[in-house]
């Protein structure tokens, strides 16, 4: 589970300015290219020892669990028209939610 910490708004604003300042050294690059480079650095373990990848996976899993809790999936399958909500969809979501086979 992701530990929630509440940095102050000033801390976040300072950090954002620092990141933007650092990215400004990439002259002639579009903003989207700069962001792609930053994300690539975070996810390819070039920065923060790969912790970002783990945290993002946990966040995505938590969000999916919230949006598609098990009773919601079963209900959707029960009330859907025949073939509208295939069991393969349910299985795919369950595989994402329960990646470590913890019986969630």
Image: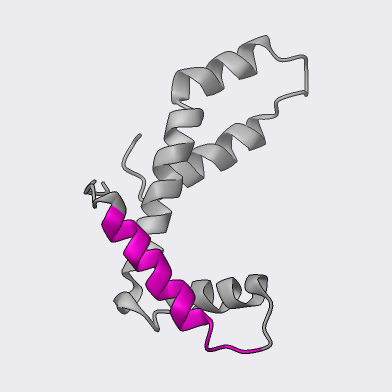
- Please identify the residue farthest to the top as the structure is shown: 79
2 left or right of 91 in image: left
Q: Quadrant of the C terminus?
A: top left
- The way the protein has been coloured in the rendering is one colour
Does 90 appear above or below 29? above
- Seen from the viewer's position, the closer of residues 15 and 83 is 15
Instruction: From the image, give the main secondary structure of the stretch colored magenta.
Output: helix
Residue 31, percent from left and from top: 64, 72
Residue at 42%, 55% (x, y): give it.
57
In the image, residue 43 lies in the stretch drawn in magenta: no
Residue 101, percent from left and from top: 36, 45
How many numbered marks, from 0 up?
Answer: 0
Residue at 62%, 12% (x, y): give it.
78
Residue at 23%, 47% (x, y): give it.
6
- Seen from the viewer's position, the closer of residues 52 and 76 is 52
20 left or right of 11 in image: right
Does 59 appear above or below 36? above
Residue 62, percent from left and from top: 39, 40
Report the magenta residues as a range.
10-27
Does 96 appear above or below 36? above
Residue 98 seen anywhere in this rendered image of the structure: no
Residue 20 seen anywhere in this rendered image of the structure: yes
Residue at 71%, 15% (x, y): give it.
80
- Seen from the viewer's position, the closer of residues 83 and 57 is 57
**Quadrant assignment, res 77:** top right
86 left or right of 56 in image: right
Residue 47, percent from left and from top: 36, 80
């Amino acid at each position: 589970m992701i530990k929630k910490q509440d940095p102050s708004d000033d801390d976040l604003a300072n950090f954002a300015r620092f990141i933007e300042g650092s990215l400004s050294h990439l002259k002639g690059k579009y903003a989207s290219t700069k962001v792609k480079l930053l994300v690539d650095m975070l996810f390819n373990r070039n920065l923060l020892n790969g912790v970002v990848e783990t945290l993002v996976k946990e966040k995505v899993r938590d969000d999916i669990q919230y949006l598609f809790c098990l009773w919601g999936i079963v209900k959707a399958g029960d009330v859907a028209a025949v073939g509208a909500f295939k069991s393969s969809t349910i299985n795919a979501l369950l595989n994402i939610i329960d990646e470590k086979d913890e019986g969630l």
